[in-house]
Amino acid sequence: MKKMFSMSLVMLLAISVILAGCGNKNQGASNASGGDTGNSAKPSNVQIGMVTDVGGVNDKSFNQSAWEALQAVEKDTGVKVKYLQSKSDQDYIPNLNQFVKGDFNLTWGIGFNLADAIGKVAKENPNKNLAIIDSVVDAPNVKSVVFAENEGSFLAGVVAGKLTKTNKIGFVGGQDSPLIKRFEKGFEAGIKAVNPNAKLEVNYTGAFDKPDLGKAAAATIYNSGADIIFHAAGGSGTGVFNEALARKQQGQQVWVIGVDKDQSLEFGDGVTLTSMVKHVDEAVKRVSQEVIDGKFKGGVETLALKDNGVGLADTSTKNVPKDVLDLVEQYKQKIIKGEIKVPSK
């Protein structure tokens, strides 16, 4: 009897150890997978979509910057990202709805031209998260990211005003809109601050996806004697660079100031004087991470010089002398401190 009791006790202890081991194993698995993270989701389950404007994902400008940012988010976190390219404004709503109806966790609209479409889709789908670059959509489920382009463009104007040899400078815009006017007016103010004798010639192409129109606009301005052109024309700006490159091959030294991203990386230092960079990439990464972390909230976020949201490309040192860059820094600090109010229209 004692023997049977001893064996039973041993078996009972053994079973207890096994059950305890299973419990610890299950607990370890739960911790390894992250456990309950509140509103956040596993990155591998998160899907983020992006709808371009008509400039397309390879516009060498802000659409491309946004897409490259999402690709970086995918690489770093494991989320799934996808883009749809809009060939016309008729594609905006169908493209947005493809992501929204497909239960994507966030749908981006890149460019102010998508504002009306984002607003309509957001209203029809109040439980879906959307975000837009370069425009404000007043809806609780939309994050609107805008930039103080006039402030960054002012710094580009300082460079142009100091380095022009002809006192004739050009500006090529895409669509004539309040957004592009911020580039133009900020640039003009920067020029006038350092070179009141310089003249600015302005030419709008009317489109963000027509390089041939950008090339023609640049040719007109260069023919008038300008030696520097700042463009804010999206894909049409490719034509501005093409015109400058063609003239360089003929022995004429003209310059282009790029926009949105460091365009010297695409078109080279031989014609890219500097670039007025908008950190669209950082904005896209930050808002996308909010969705991954379950912290997304609608509202407006404005990125200015003080936020490092705009500024000149780091590669400016290749073509812009140190004394001019030092002057740029002085003006930058004055703008940040509020000593200079840069016009936007």
Image: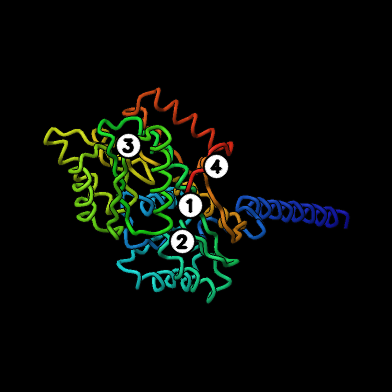
Q: Local crowd at mark 1 within 10 Å, few (<14), some, or many (≥20)?
A: many
Q: Which mark is residue 284?
A: 1
User: Residue 140 at what x, y percent from top left?
Assistant: 60, 66
Residue at disc 1, secondary structure: helix
Determine which residue is flagged by label 2.
108
Give the Cα separation between the discs numbered 3 and 4.
30 Å
Quadrant in which the N terminus appears: bottom right
Q: Local crowd at mark 3 within 10 Å, few (<14), some, or many (≥20)?
A: many
> From what the image shows, is residue 82 above or below residue 158?
below
Determine which residue is flagged by label 4.
307
| Residue 123 or residue 250, whichever sits in front | 250
Q: Local crowd at mark 2 within 10 Å, few (<14), some, or many (≥20)?
A: many
Residue type of the residue flagged with mark 4: Asp
Determine which residue is flagged by label 3.
198
Q: Residue at x 50, y 53 (%)?
A: 146
Give the Cα separation between the discs numbered 1 and 2.
9 Å
The answer to which of marks 3 and 4 sits earlier in the sequence is 3
